[in-house]
Image: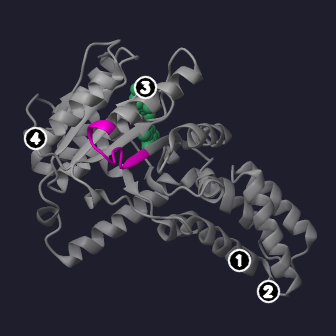
Amino acid sequence: MSEEKKGFFKGLWGKIAGSDDGGEGTSTEPVQQAAGPVSEVSPSAADGESRKAGFFERLKQGLSKTRDSLVGRIDRLVLGKKEIDADTLEGLEEILITADIGVQTTVELIRTLEQRLSRNELKDGAALKEALKEEILKRVVRDAAPLDTTAASPFVIMVIGVNGVGKTTTIGKLAARYCQQGKRVVLAAGDTFRAAAAEQLQAWGERAGVDVVRHQEGADPSAVVFDGIKAAVARKADILIVDTAGRLHTKVNLMEELKKVRRIMGRELPGAPHETLLVLDAATGQNAISQARLFKEAAEVSGIALTKLDGTAKGGIVVAICNEFRIPVRYIGVGEGVEDLRDFDPAQFVEALFQ
Ligand SMILES: Nc1nc2c(ncn2[C@@H]2O[C@H](COP(=O)(O)OP(=O)(O)OP(=O)(O)O)[C@@H](O)[C@H]2O)c(=O)[nH]1
């Protein structure tokens, strides 16, 4: 592992353990301390409330660039407007498109707002902003569904997505979070194509104190998955998370391999994978939309994780993804810490965006 990656892991796990030593040391002790049962972390309802408030503030902070580029510009457009007209809606249309809400969703939103305008529902700038917020919420809430991992045991999550979107980090964060909930987790390093992928996953596994099934670089990913399922069943794991390659020699190869991996899973454990989680990098904007289209067609995606919403002004992509693909967004990533991968809560998201 590169020094840079080592440094990253140290910093990250320092944050989880809440220690200043940067997560120093090889034992999993500091992690287990912080990753105790949830009830120990939040013993009272008051603590629960303050944690919730803390989460919301962090979400707001994570979304600050998007809020500035979207809501900040809308505020400037409508500020003090006593009347809304076609020009205002045209200005709004441009803002929505440049904030990566996507052409299709923008056109729908503007059409709906035009109808509301013609019904005299948008009397001023504040009413327009409120109506937009409502219409966005309608579209992000429609298919929202948190991932229920109790539907099977082991519950198999196959994680897919192109290189660099945050797949391994997301798997690591999920493993740590499920461990916190007292679940038994196994990871399978199905990305045998990229040299450091299994190593990176192993590091996450060690830190979270979960088993990682891995083979040599270049091995057949299906063999890793086969062993992963055997290990998860033998160890009575609640959850098996399978990493997959994000890049192969060609796109066709990649999709064929994902299909093969899926076939093997289903053969070894009927019903698996129970979730095919597509990871997308929000900062790539419209590229994330193209990736969603490609993977949806070829890989039976059942849920989406959108990462890196913190570093980007392109957070409008969440709205586009929810509205255009009708696949539930399960998680959003708003930072590098474990706490920064969170369940996607549409109402909270829209509130954080507009506040
Ligand atoms: N700021 C921020 N960075 C993130 C987030 N999620 C992942 N990252 C960073 O994105 C980079 C790439 O993440 P990886 O998990 O290595 O991505 P990957 O998809 O597994 O990439 P490959 O292993 O190359 O296939 C890392 O530096 C992560 O820390 C997020 O929500 N916010």
Q: Is residue 272 magenta?
A: yes
The answer to whether residue 337 of the structure is visible from this angle is: no
Q: Give me the disc on residue 131.
A: 1
If you read the primary sequence from the N terminus, does the residue marked by circle 2 or circle 1 appear first? 2
Question: Which of pointers 3 and 2 indicates the residue nearer the eye?
Answer: 3
The image quadrant of residue 38 is: bottom left
Q: Which residues are magenta?
A: 267-276
Whichever of callouts 4 and 3 sits on the residue coming sooner in the sequence is 4
18 or 253: nearer the viewer: 253
Q: Nearer the viewer, residue 308 or 288?
A: 288
Residue 180 % position (x, y) = 18, 53
Quadrant housing the C terminus: bottom right
Mark 1: amino acid: Ala
Residue at 60% across, 41% down:
297
Q: Is the CB atom of the residue marked by disc 3 within 8 angstroms of ligand 1's nearest atom?
A: yes
- Between the residue at mark 4 and the residue at mark 2, the CA separation in whole angstroms equals 60 Å
Residue 176, quarter of picture = top left
Classify mark 1: helix, strand or loop.
helix
| Lower sequence index among marks 3 and 2 | 2
Q: Position of residue 296 (x, y in %)?
A: 57, 43
Residue at 83 percent across and 76 percent down: it is 81
Label 3 sits on what residue type? Answer: Ala
The numbered disc on residue 121 is 2
Circle on res. 245: 3
Residues tagged 2 and 1 counted as in contact (Cβ below 8 A): yes
